[in-house]
Amino acid sequence: MSLIVKNEQNDKNEPTQAQEKLNLFERTQDVIRTALDRMGYKDDVYDLLKEPLRLLTVRIPVRMDDDSIKVFTGYRAQHNDAVGPTKGGVRFHPDVTEEEVKALSMWMSIKCGITGLPYGGGKGGIQCDPRSMSFREQERLSRGYVRAISQLVGPTKDIPAPDVFTNSQVMAWMMDEYSRIREFDSPGFITGKPLVLGGSAGRESSTALGVTIVMKEAAKIAGLEIPGSRIIIQGFGNAGSFLAQFLHEAGAKVVGISDAYGALYDPEGLDIPTLLDKRDSFGTVTPYFKSQQITNKELLVQECDILVPAAIENQLTEENAPDIKARIVVEAANGPTTLKATEILTNRGILLVPDVLASAGGVVVSYFEWVQNNQGYYWSEEEVQDKLEKILTTSFHNVYRTSTDKKVDMRLAAYIVGLKRVAEAIKWRGWV
């Protein structure tokens, strides 16, 4: 395996991108306004949907292992609950901001609308770096967050889930704390739990499986077969690593991957089983390989059939979109492509599957988990996968058909499909 590696922790957003709107919240508002205008809704609907209905900011004191007290800032945004309770993950990350959480809650509303789920969008986050925290410090922080937001969340109000740097263990702590506060067992309060605590089979890999499902549908439209296709996956976290595994097992050539510390590229295909074996719990693997070097940005413009940005936002921009060599771009990350880059890629004939569609597998299986918790009856992994495939296949073709019928790019088409449900619910409720 011939590898190319680059240490590039500071290679994220260059000053040359300053002419583009990189703020996720403002970009989301722009697309929401355009989508609502296309559907003929008045400004009052946009005024209601341009911001979350509720945003809670909390301060969480945590006793650290050295007996000091550190105070963390956390957020919970509930975009709109006209359709039903809000739903969305909780991320632990040092770069969490209020505007990011607000934007992500709005995207969750759109994801739920695209897939027909009885939810509005929610999202939470805590400014912290779990990579520098002990197991017990993470537990204290998780429980402290639930205590701070407990009045606003619950199985019929707002249902959290895993997100960046959170997992089934964090969900278990949060569920246990909520159950203590409410004084009854509340498995439906949160999704992404361990199976033994009411989790759903297939939840951990659901985001990656969803990406795989929509990728297969996109490949059919582009005249590609997944077996033998050359695929670059930027990011090797939960979604990226499961995706690499699924695609490798399907016979695809995963020719490039990256993590927070570097990039690996081999035009003949990477040794995915070896990389998965060496990967740590935060998705880091590149430090094990020291060879020829390229930057992460150079990885994005290497030869491939399908490019999957599965890392951070603002990776495909006006600067590098003209150089993307893929025939299909599937956004597994949140906001990896700017609006200008979306326009450039679409005009170049590259099929772009937007994040609100491509990464919807997680919330769909979270919905399945919530349903199973409510009814006390649990499905097999095969049942979960079959149901997921039906929903996402239908959702993909609804968005693609809207794109062709209305002659708009796939991102705007996804917003049109996703916003229609919540806008109709708002109207029926008489809110506007």
Image: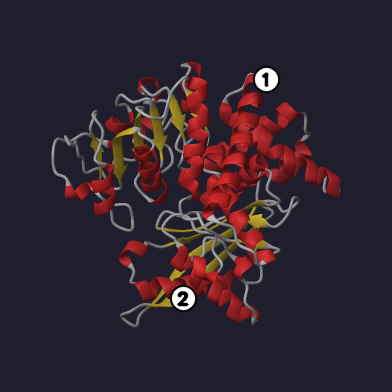
Number of numbered discs present?
A: 2
Which residue is drawn at the image coordinates 62% and 24% (left, top)? 403
Callout in the foreground (2, 1): 1
Closer to us: 17 or 223: 223
Most extreme residue toward the left, as rendered? Answer: 291
Q: Amino acid at mark 2?
A: Pro
**Residue 397, percent across and down?**
62, 29
Considering only vertical position in the picture, is 76 above or below 136?
A: above
Q: Quadrant of residue 290?
A: top left
Q: Quadrant of the C terminus?
A: top right
Most extreme residue toward the top, as rendered? Answer: 348
Residue 343 seen in the current view: no
**Residue 195, percent across and down?**
50, 65
Q: Residues within 10 Å of mark 1 (few under 14, many from 20)?
A: few
Measure how far apart labels 2 and 1 are at the Cα level: 53 Å
Q: Which residue is mark 1?
A: 405
Q: Quadrant of the N terminus?
A: top left
Dot placed on the residue nearer the N-terminal end, 2 or 1: 2
Q: Which mark is residue 61?
A: 2
Which residue is drawn at the image coordinates 33% and 58% (left, top)? 281
